[in-house]
Image: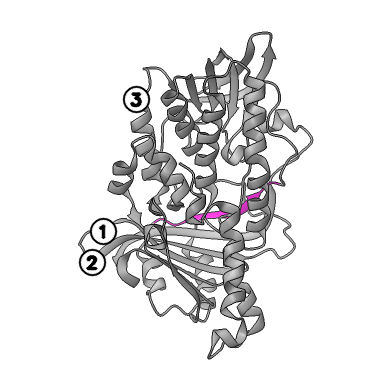
Amino acid sequence: MKAIIAGGGIGGLTTAMMLAARGIECTVHEQSPRHRELGVGITLMPTAVGALAGLGLLPALDSIGVSSAHLYYQTRRGQTVWDEPRGRAAGHAMPQMFVHRGHLLGMLANEAAARLPAGTIRLGQRLIAWRQTDNGVEARFACADGGEHVETADLLIGADGIHSATRASLHPDEGPPRFSGLQMWRGAADWPAFLGGASLLILGGVDAKLVLYPIGPGTAPDRRLTNWVVIVRTAPDGSSPPNRADWAREGDLADLAPHLDLFHCTDVDARGLIAASGTIWEYALFDRDPVAFWSRGCVTLLGDAAHPMYPMGANGATQAILDAVTLADALMGTPDIAAALAQYQAARLAPTAEIVRANRRGGPEAVIDVVERLAPDGFTDVDAVLSRADRHAILQGYAAKVGMIPQQEVR
């Protein structure tokens, strides 16, 4: 069996290694002429870390990331709504990891290049068309040098992101991604450790949010490479998105600065951290409505091509990795590719669709919205605003959806 993977991002590279570990040949076609370590921080949930550990990648992850120990949710005023242990401290067999997206992509690219046969990863090739044949699938790629390349295989896996050509072929009437009305700025800088050095701190709900967490070692034991994110609703009606969904757009601190007045953060000098970050990145938040199917014959979708989602709940990369292990397991040892893809779709489509919808409502961070709505002027006792049981129910509802309850871990 041979697979063509369109897209060499986190999902595509992980899928390639998952397939190889099960004896399935593949080629990976990435439109960028080189793997660029773009982006800033992402979170990998224990389920995803467990899947990568199955490939022997846990030591490499440990070398580039930070194992999360604690979570703090606060209002924009800096009042704590909820805090809890995370990862192994919460009873999971695997850690929850904070990592620089670019460093993770670089690690995966290096590991894939070392493990897979020479020529498996083809850079500078963008999928432009495909067709099913009597023997499988034929895919046509535009090459960075201006030429074209045709590849044949038994199946095609579209891991080509939110602007997926594979998805557009399966759903030609879908239209462009859906703009949320939210604008995000993000960056990272070497900064003094806070709240124990391995904590996630989030202030504010869906419409205005400040996120802070470490994503790697710093220049000294008491410092960390610290990621920050600011998300603000700048277009309440969701009209007129300011730019295309593109992670590689540089932002302007002058555009961000007025929004920082929304937050009162006593645990971190957020303004200082942001000012120290050098380049900042700007991104308008887009997703897509869940679709009725991902697979047709010997073609399927994976990762952001299948279920692009808002970063509330920090599950985008995790869900792509879980797609990869589920798909590889379904394909292993079966000659019936269409049945395997149907099995993969049955396992993953509905759960990820629910996460997309939940993230639109704020994901687990919706608990902050509820408290801010009930106590807009702040509080002296959060339990008097919303009981601990009610706050826990909001968080547990999301945790169950994404597999964050320890007993539900995926290998």
Residue 162, percent across and down?
61, 41
Relative to 402, say whether 226 is above or below.
below
Q: Residue at (75%, 62%) from the top-left corner?
A: 237
Mark 3 and mark 1 residues within 8 Å of each other at the beta carbon: no
> Does the magenta run of residues contain 281?
yes
Give me the C-alpha separation between circle 3 and circle 2. 36 Å
The amino acid pointed to by label 3 is: Arg
Pointer 1 residue: 218
The amino acid pointed to by label 2 is: Asp
Give me the C-alpha separation between circle 3 and circle 1. 30 Å
- Describe the element under mark 2 as helix, strand or loop: loop
Q: Dividing the picture into quarters, in which one does residue 88 lie? A: bottom left
Relative to 27, say whether 244 is above or below.
below
Pointer 3 residue: 115
Q: Residues within 10 Å of mark 3 (few under 14, many from 20)?
A: some
In the image, which disc is placed on residue 385?
Answer: none
Pointer 2 residue: 222
- Describe the element under mark 3 as helix, strand or loop: helix
Residue lying at the far front in this picture: please name it: 407
Please say whether residue 349 is visible from this viewpoint: yes
The amino acid pointed to by label 1 is: Gly
Q: Which residues are magenta?
A: 279-288
